[in-house]
Every structure is written in structure tokens, then in C-alpha cells.
Image (cartoon, grey):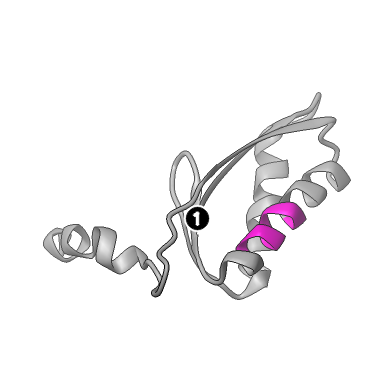
Amino acid sequence: MAIQVLPKTSGNAYDIIDKAIAVIKRSGVKYRVCPFETVMEGDYEQLMQIADDVQQECFFAGAEEVLVYLKIQRRKDSDVTMEEKVGKYERNEE
């Protein structure tokens, strides 16, 4: 799952986004922060709960409203990993 959260706030949006990323980090799932979104691996129900927790943290941190964009790839009988999607590119960077 990829999640992008855009908080509406009169304060610093990056401070709120940092708190949202901290929720993901504390969750224990494998994740990668990217420039426009954060990508996570895990059980569907767990990831959806994290997405909700992220939104609640944004509200707690002062956001009046959040726009949340999710990208989800699911398979019927197996997990989807970041490694299978982008691993070959990361190995070429070394």
C-alpha cells in the first residue's frame, strides 16, 4: 500500500506529515518513505488500520482536514513485496 497524506493546516504541514510517518514507523511494518508517498508492506487489515491511525494522528497534531490517497495492490493467494517491484533497480544503483 502507498499512502499520501496532505494535511490542511494553518501550521507547518511537514511537521504533521512527520508525525504521520512516525505512526507508520511505530507500527512495525516494512515501509519506505518516498518524496510523494510512503509505501508499506503487510496484511491488508493491518495496513488499513495504520491508514486510519495516520489520519487520526494528523488531526491530533492540528490538521483541520486531510486528503488521503491510497494505492493498493492485492493478490488472491500471495503477498506483493517492494523487492519484487523495484529491487532490480535498487541493485543497479550500487
**Residue position for label 1:** 1
49 magenta-colored: yes
The location of residue 12, given as percent across then percent down, is 72, 32
Quick one: 94 or 76, which is closer to the camera? Answer: 76
Q: Is residue 6 left or right of residue 38?
A: right
The location of residue 38, given as percent across then percent down, is 51, 51
The location of residue 6, given as percent across then percent down, is 65, 33
Determine the residue located farthest toward the top in the rendered image: 10
Q: Amino acid at mark 1?
A: Met
Residue at 61% across / 63% down in the picture? 47
Residue at 69% across / 51% down in the picture? 20
Inspect this view and state whether residue 91 appears: yes
Quick one: 39 or 76, which is closer to the camera? Answer: 76
Q: Main secondary structure of the magenta part?
A: helix
Res 4 quadrant in image? top right
Residue at 75% across / 47% down in the picture? 55
Q: Where is 16 relative to 94, above or below?
A: above
Q: Is residue 80 left or right of residue 17?
A: left
Inspect this view and state whether residue 22 appears: no
Res 76 quadrant in image? bottom left
Q: Which residues are magenta?
A: 47-53
Q: Is residue 24 left or right of residue 41?
A: right
Q: Where is 43 relative to 55, above or below?
A: below
